[in-house]
Image (cartoon, rainbow, N blue to C red):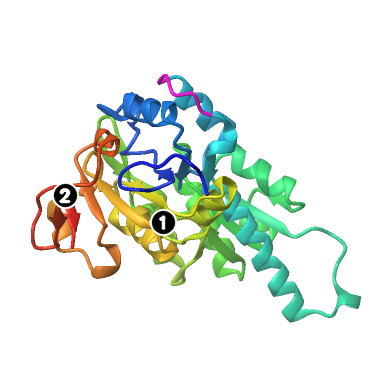
Amino acid sequence: MVGTTFFGGHDALLCDLDGVVYAGAEAIDEAVPSLVELGRRGVPVAYVTNNASRSPEAVADHLSGFGLPVSGEQVFGAAAAGVALLSESLAESLSASESAATRPDSPASVLVVGSAYLRDLVTQAGHQVVDTAADRPDAVIQGFDPSVSWTDLAQASYAIRGGAQWIATNADLTIPRAEGIAPGNGALVEAVSQATGTRPRVAGKPGPVLFELAVRAFNAESPLVVGDRLDTDILGGNRAGFDTALVLTGVDSGQTAATAPDEQQPTWMIPSLASLLADPQPAWSASNTTVGARS
């Protein structure tokens, strides 16, 4: 167990990025100095993100630009989780359909909708990246990138309707930007789902895998998950069995928390990351939108 604790006895912080640390190109008020202070106190901080467009090292460089001393080992992203799920799904399909003696030697072909980083990870995993549905890919993996176009979504739809497996790195419907709330990967996944009549297997939050990877890396026993979204950060942290805190600097609010289902209820609501430097506040219930802790 990690020696240093914070916020009522937690031994590691599992922190979301968009809407918590920054919105677009701008740092969120009080986020950076609060995280720097937690680091100074010796609190391990992991950044657990559904962003699948950048490598852990690129994310760490971005955070360093805000004045946060972060290494790639502290970043746990949905792209790597998505490729792991892709490889697992392809192996399961091959095992179910063919005997070992008749399995092809050629790698599985994958249509990648997303960033160059996601394409690189798919290649590093031993799969062949193809560009169109005409290449008859075995699978489609879909992650967010601002450059994703209608043509990309159409090619994914054609491939999936043609029998390709479908993996999504994450299902966030929206992304907080400096200008406001913008469509996220989940919104683009919904477009493909409407065209195909199917749903993908989803790798990132609200699944518990990213949180569990971070906890194992830090050997933590009592982590705190902090995020701005009830349907991904809070739900995922709850599913992993960890305490959760909804920070009111991004997508969700006290009002949306008041009407959220039980599985999306946070342990606490906090106005900003500065709240983590003190002990938790008094009891909070779903019928009360004041900041504090739920009973």
* Total marks in image: 2
Looking at the picture, how far across and down is residue 33, in whole percent?
33, 24
The dot on residue 271 is none
Does 69 appear in magenta? Answer: yes
- Which residue is drawn at the image coordinates 44% and 60% (left, top)? 192
The dot on residue 292 is 2
Number of residues whose C-alpha sits closer than 10 Å to that of mark 1, classed few (under 14), some (14–19) or many (20 or more): many
State the extent of the magenta-drawn residues as a range.
Answer: 66-70
Task: Quadrant for the C terminus, please.
Answer: bottom left
Q: Is residue 71 visible?
A: yes
Is 148 left or right of 293, judged from the image as shown? right
Is 162 left or right of 238, judged from the image as shown? right
Looking at the picture, how far across and down is residue 85, in whole percent?
61, 61
Is 104 left or right of 189, judged from the image as shown? right
* Amino acid at circle 1: Ala
Query: Within the image, what quadrant is residue 241 found in?
Result: bottom left
Looking at the picture, how far across and down is residue 267, in whole percent?
26, 57
- Which residue is drawn at the image coordinates 25% and 27% (left, top)? 29
Check disc 1 and report the residue beneath it: 171
- Front-most of residues 264 and 85: 264
Does 129 appear in magenta? Answer: no
Secondary element type, mark 2? strand
Q: Is residue 55 visible?
A: no
* Amino acid at circle 2: Gly
- Which residue is drawn at the image coordinates 47% and 60% (left, top)? 208
Secondary element type, mark 1? loop
Number of residues whose C-alpha sits closer than 10 Å to that of mark 2, classed few (under 14), some (14–19) or many (20 or more): many
Q: What secondary structure characterizes most of the magenta part?
A: loop
Looking at the picture, how far across and down is residue 73, in whole percent?
59, 37
- Which residue is drawn at the image coordinates 45% and 19% (left, top)? 65
Mark 1–mark 2 Cα distance, whole angstroms, equals 28 Å
